Image: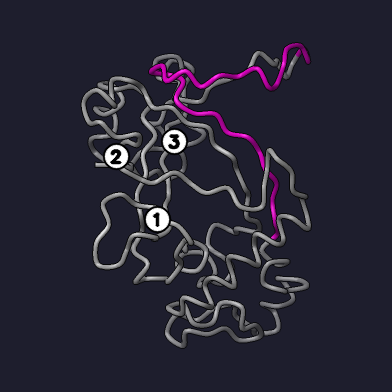
Amino acid sequence: WYLHNEIVQSIPRKYDVTRVMRLKVTLKNPQAWWDAHHTQFGQYVAFDQAMCTVPNCQSIWDTYGAVVGCQAPNSDVANYQAARQTTLRCDNGHCNDPVWYSLPGPCPSAYYGYKTQECTDQFPGGFCFSSYNETTGLGDKDDWEVTGAWNCSYHVDWAGQVRLDDLVGIDNYTEFVAAGYQEYDKIQDAGYGTDFWNDIHNLTAGQIRMERLKDLFVEKVGENAKFPRDLPEPVCDAP
């Protein structure tokens, strides 16, 4: 959804995005959030360059801790839908919409590159660390535990990456653009030089693109019990 609606419509691609990174997230939001709202997920808050841009985000974290939020973007904009229900509060046929998440990191009140040690110490974010020390090489990378403490609500495992060029079928993006081609034009609802992104509102076309990405992860990264081809996301029940 985000790639199609935000990234590939620009020349060059927005933010110079070149790859899709896959992450496996283990989550347990703070008990204080559950006690107040009885939902697993919190309110989604938008981030820009690692800084929260929603006026009330700091109030949420000061009250409950580093709450992970979720939200379903509108599939009427780009028709990507999961095979299973993804949202609890769904209506008008939007029960299987895509979901994006907000995971507060260190000093989320400042942009990336402007985060001070004082700010990071005051609000370290919700990432749950293992005992491993990159400097000394001591400790265990896999002994992390998501406790649901105010500063330990999620852990992220790297699960591989796929180049956008491989996904779309472009040999060299720089040469592709130099030749006058374009991945996707929103007005025409089609690309020039590739038809991969054609038909943004076509459900079948969207499903084919999603399956292509899953297949590429298996091809490029492999498949095992820890990182299966398809790992269903939990239902987004944010208030």
Q: Is residue 230 left or right of residue 64?
A: right
**Closest to the observer: 193 or 215?**
215
Say few, some or many: other residues with alpha carbon within 10 Å of mark 2 (under 14 / 14 to 19 / 20 or more).
some
* Front label number (1 vs 2): 1
Residue 138 highlighted magenta (yes or no): yes
Q: Dot 2 lies on which element?
A: strand
Q: Are marks 1 and 2 in contact (CB under 8 Å)?
A: no
Q: Which mark is residue 103?
A: 3
Amino acid type indicated by mark 3: Leu
Q: Which residue is mark 2?
A: 43
Amino acid type indicated by mark 2: Gln
The residue shown at (27%, 57%) is 90
Magenta segment, prevailing SS (helix, strand or loop): loop
Measured in 3D between alpha carbons, the distance from the residue under mark 3 to the one under mark 2, in whole angstroms, is: 11 Å
Amino acid type indicated by mark 1: Gln
Q: Which residues fall within the magenta stretch?
A: 136-163
- Relative image position of residue 199 (x, y in whole percent): 49, 82
Relative to residue 8, is residue 219 depicted above or below?
Answer: above
- Relative image position of residue 65 (x, y in whole percent): 34, 22
Q: Which residue is mark 1?
A: 85
The residue shown at (42%, 71%) is 78
Q: Is residue 231 left or right of residue 74?
A: right
